[in-house]
Amino acid sequence: MSNPFDLSGRTALVTGSSRGLGRAIAEGLAGAGARIILNGINSRRLEDAATEMRAAGYDVLTAVFDVTDEAAIVSAFASFDADNISVDILVNNAGMQFRKPMVELATADWQRVIDTNLTSAFVIGREAARRMMTRGQGKIINIGSLTSELARATVAPYTVAKGGIKMLTKAMAAEWGEHGIQANAIGPGYMVTDMNEALISNPQFDSWVKTRTPARRWGRPEELAGTAVYLASSAADYVNGQIIYVDGGMISVL
């Protein structure tokens, strides 16, 4: 019996993947056999990541484009087409955080978070799906958050964007499922990443996370890899429109 988790022969585009969660997911997919397209806006950081992954024996390409620039996204996919590169797996990981009370929040800052965390997943997902539909198969994995379900003060645009990711995933499943495309999401808990560095170094917040989480610790980026491989693989061919929380149990308890 063949291994249903084997991703050999498939190409995965992971946005925002030069470091952090995206890099960990990219390495997990590569370890399962996929060719990886790393994405980011810092070309030097991206090439450094690609070099490190190639040294580990992985097949890695890079695509430098801003996920909030629709023209750049369209151009990137046109380049993939010209080079006969089929994106079989898309991981919409790119994101940002911005903390400020809503009464002090400028509309431009709100829009920037929404564009980066939500609209980009729609635009890149649309471009990928157009091509996946012609092939009759494809996997889309959107990265949500605990805030896809729960809110916290001072992160309203992030919360709204990640709540939107949950419903965007369901909308993708509703429209594209008949074309052999499965769209699912992963909701990470509190992870040790550069974006969370200020929170990790705050003793009060660090204690709150550890007390609030049944696992009594922060998550590690590589702990998302198994879920990503599963959702990207044929083992999940009948899983569609779901969000799986990888959070040490936080969302399950009061």
Image (cartoon, grey):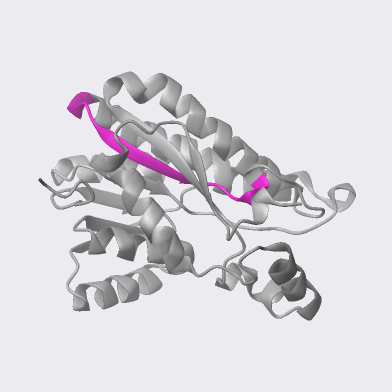
- Residue 55 is covered by the magenta coloring: no
On screen, residue 210 versus residue 220, left or right, reads: right
Q: Whole-percent x and y of residue 227?
A: 40, 52
Q: Is residue 155 left or right of residue 18?
A: right
User: Who is closer to the viewer here, 195 or 182?
Assistant: 182
Question: Which quadrant of the structure image shows residue 164?
Answer: top right
Task: Give the x, y percent position of residue 98.
Answer: 70, 58
Residue 64 or residue 4, whichever sits in front: 4
Residue 118 screen position, x and y as percent: 56, 41
Evaluate whether residue 62 shows in this view: no
The residue that appears at 10% across and 45% down in the rendered structure is 1
| Furthest residue toward left | 1
Q: Which residue is depicted at the point 21% across and 25% down? A: 134
Residue sitting at 57 percent across and 73 percent down?
Answer: 194
- Which quadrant would residue 177 be assigned to in this image? top left
Seen at 82% across and 53% down, the residue is: 153
Towards the viewer: 197 or 247: 247
Instruction: Please state the horizontal and vertical placement of residue 99, each as a whole percent of the image.
Output: 75, 59
**First to last magenta residue range:** 134-147
* Residue 151 in view, yes or no: yes
Residue farthest toward the right in the current orientation of the protein: 103
Number of marks in the rendered image? 0
- Position of 102 with respect to 71 (left or right) is right
Taking 172 as reference, is 208 above or below it?
below
Residue 138 on the magenta span: yes
